[in-house]
Image: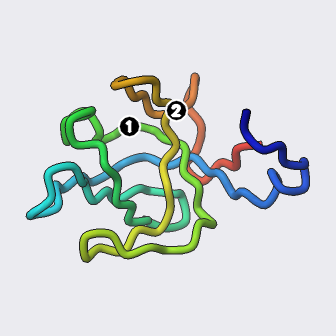
């Protein structure tokens, strides 16, 4: 069982919708992509371990959910400014997306 949080804790998370506009495999890494994600008012770089789950072509243009107020981290020499959200079960993975079009930068509530 996971730890319970309060609504106040949840409201600290700034989750936004963005569109992946560029995908590059990080040289020397077997699992990492460097993504450029259009967040509406800015382009964010996110490093993610999606190699093996998605091709670069499958990712480009995909609308995703991004945690944007996560402290930046340096991963494999690249700065990651956010975290995309995905569901995982065993060896399956699916990105969280929207069920209809909405503008980049829309807040998840």
Q: Is residue 102 left or right of residue 3?
A: left
Q: Residue at x 51, y 57 (%)?
A: 39
Q: Which residue is denoted by mark 2 in the rendering?
A: 97
Spot occupied by residue 5 in the image (x, y as percentages of width and height): 84, 48
Q: Residue furthest front?
A: 1
85 or 5: nearer the viewer: 5
Q: Secondary structure at mark 1?
A: loop
Counting the numbered discs, the total is 2
Q: Residue at x 50, y 62 (%)?
A: 82
Q: Residue at x 46, y 30 (%)?
A: 88
Going from N to C along the chain, the mark reached first, 2 or 1, is: 1
Q: Is residue 8 left or right of residue 46?
A: right
Circle 1 Cα neighbour tier, 10 Å, few/some/many (<14 / 14–19 / ≥20): some
Dots 2, 1 in contact, CB < 8 A: yes
Circle 2 Cα neighbour tier, 10 Å, few/some/many (<14 / 14–19 / ≥20): some
Spot occupied by residue 32 in the image (x, y as percentages of width and height): 24, 54
Spot occupied by residue 23 in the image (x, y as percentages of width and height): 23, 52
Locate the N terminus and report the quarter of the image it occupies. Answer: top right
Q: Which residue is denoted by mark 1 in the rendering?
A: 62
Locate the C terminus and report the quarter of the image it occupies. Answer: top right
Q: Is residue 28 left or right of residue 106?
A: left
In this view, 29 is above or below 49:
below
Spot occupied by residue 104 in the image (x, y as percentages of width and height): 55, 49
106 or 96: nearer the viewer: 96
């Amino acid at each position: 069982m996971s730890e319970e949080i309060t609504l106040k804790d949840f409201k600290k998370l700034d989750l936004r919708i963005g569109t992946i506009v560029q995908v590059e495999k990080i040289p020397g890494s077997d699992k990492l992509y460097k993504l450029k994600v259009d967040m509406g008012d800015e382009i964010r770089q996110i490093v993610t371990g999606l190699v093996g789950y998605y091709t670069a072509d499958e990712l480009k243009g995909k609308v995703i959910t991004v945690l944007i107020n996560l402290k930046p981290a340096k991963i494999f020499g690249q700065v990651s400014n956010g975290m995309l959200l995905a569901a995982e079960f065993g060896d399956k993975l699916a990105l969280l997306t929207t069920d209809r079009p909405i503008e980049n930068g829309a807040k998840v509530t």
